[in-house]
Image: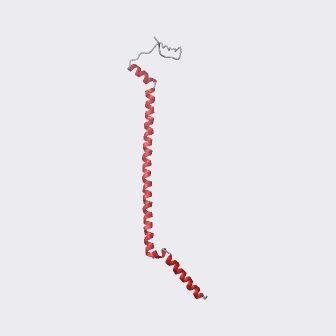
Amino acid sequence: MSKFMISAKLHDLKEKFYKKNILTKYQLNSRSWLIVLMILIGVSGLLYLAQINGLATKGYEIKDLEEKSAELRDKNKKLKLQITDLRSTARLNQAVKELEMVEVARVEYLKANGTSVAINR
């Protein structure tokens, strides 16, 4: 076989391969590649903007939640102080005077002689 025949056979094999290859049917020229590249850049830009917008929104939400948390902490402190004030002995003594309660001089405790509490008469 001569070099010419080998070259021709190689050329025939390449043509058969390219005819079978699907991508060769849809080969894009340089203008088409440019359009595809522009579309990809546009889509990626839009996705980037959407992500940045989402992050900014989440930042504002976090700030609002932190402010609400601080307000609730302050309210909790005020309520604890109010509870302490209402439980204080001075407040209880004042309530006793306002309700005109009488102080008990002698306190008697009853002892149960068994496990039963009811009285049988």
Residue found farthest to the right: 1
Front-most of residues 33 and 51 = 33
Q: Residue 57, position in %: x, y?
A: 42, 53
Residue at 43% over, 75% down = 31
- For the point 52% across and 78% down, the residue is 17
Q: Position of residue 34 (x, y in %)?
A: 44, 72
62 versus 44 height, above or below? above
**Which colour style is shown?**
secondary structure
Query: For this rendering, which residue is in front, 30 or 24?
Result: 24
Task: Please identify the residue farthest to the top as the structure is shown.
Answer: 121
Give residue 97's position: percent from left, percent from top: 40, 19
In the rendered image, residue 78, in percent from the top left (x then y), is placed at 43, 34
Residue at (45% x, 26% y) in the render:
87
Q: Which quadrant holds the C terminus?
A: top left
Looking at the rendered image, the quarter that the N terminus falls into is bottom right
Number of marks in the rendered image: 0
Res. 79 image quadrant: top left
- Above or below residue 29? Residue 92 is above
Residue 67 in which image quadrant: top left
Q: Is residue 88 above or below residue 35?
A: above
The residue located at (44%, 63%) in the rendering is: 45
